[in-house]
Image (cartoon, grey):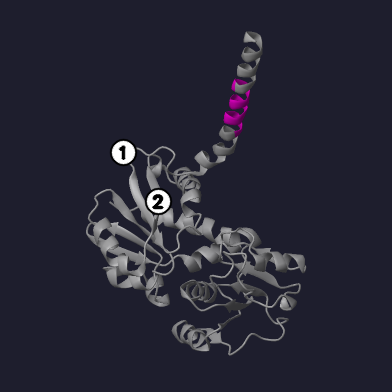
Amino acid sequence: MASHLDGLEARFEQSIADIMGQMHQALKPLTHRSSVSRVSPSARALFIVGQPIDVTRSPMDFPQALTRLKDRRAACKAADSVLLPLDVPPNGLEALVHGLAQASNCDGLIVTRPHKEAILKHCTHLTAAARAVGCCNVVRFHKGSLIGTNMDGDGFVGGLIQQRGNNAVRNQRCLLVGAGGAARAVAHGLVQNGARSVSVVNRTTARAQALAARIPGVRALDTLPSSLSDVDLLIQCTSLGHNTTDPDPVPRDLLRPPLVCCEVVHTPEETAFLRAARERGCDTHAGTHMLSSQLDAICEFLVARPE
């Protein structure tokens, strides 16, 4: 009986060891990617604020962007910053911003929906990009000032160029679906980088018209064309795609080569829109490329900050 119990105990201990080993292997990529696996008391704090916030992967990807910054800039070799998510309702934004601005170890915010326009009134200074598009997605706290900018447009264009070459935008005919803050910034970035034409269509026509009125060089369409044969880049700029139950932003029968279908949503990496485009033979460009390019610029703005 004793030997039988000893055998059971040994098998139990081995099973526990196997489970722990599997958990360790599963958690290794998470701890590598997480910016909060080990936080130094001297770390500089950054926050990404939005609602819902669980659709962003920025806190997971930020450590790699910080590493790239350290590799690029010798002055940033000792940089120690952490990015944390905050789920903030619209009526809580003002108190949050004013509170965090008092924290001496907080260097700023990344701002996502629905706060990109509301954050403007809390900034003491705005860059030309933020003023041009009328919304802000990054705020730096610096010596009592709150400096707001918008990096969505440069992030999208930068990611596209990194993946498709220096002429990825120049002379391209572009159609944006959606007319929110991200669409405004992307439209501005496309115009600034030499796109041949930039058109926008939105479920609410008035919003598309407002975008076109704000960004010189953009044309608003009343409805989605019945054919996209005269479009080179189709850019999905709505919030659709986070959930499997979301409707298609563009009818699938319009997705035909040589159309390049681009996404601004980065979670999941392949949205239903991109999957449908790929299955129909179109080239696709994921929102993760925009995020990666933008995080590099955000690190420069928030971490490699002037003293």
Residue located beneath label 1 in the image: 41
Between discs 2 and 1, the one toward the N terminus = 1
Estimate the x, y position of residue 83 in percent, counting from the top left. 40, 50
Give the numbered dot on residue 84. 2
Estimate the x, y position of residue 225 in percent, counting from the top left. 67, 86
Q: Judge from the rendering whether residue 141 lies leftward or rightward of residue 11; answer left or right.
A: left
Q: Observer-nearest residue: 87 or 194? A: 87
Q: Observer-nearest residue: 285 or 126? A: 285
Kind of residue indicated by mark 1: Pro
Taking the magenta stretch, the answer to whether it contains residue 274 is no
Q: Residues within 10 Å of mark 2 (few under 14, many from 20)?
A: some
Cα distance in 3D space between marks 2 and 1: 15 Å
Estimate the x, y position of residue 92 in percent, counting from the top left. 31, 65
Estimate the x, y position of residue 180 in percent, counting from the top left. 48, 76
**What residue is drawn where x is 51% and y is 43%?**
33
Vertical side of 43 occupied by 287: above or below: below
Q: Judge from the rendering whether residue 302 lies leftward or rightward of residue 182; answer left or right.
A: left
Could you say which quadrant of the image residue 131 lies in? bottom left
Kind of residue indicated by mark 2: Leu
Q: Main secondary structure of the magenta part?
A: helix
Residue span colored magenta: 13-22
Could you say which quadrant of the image residue 143 lies in? bottom left
**What residue is drawn where x is 61% and y is 22%?**
12
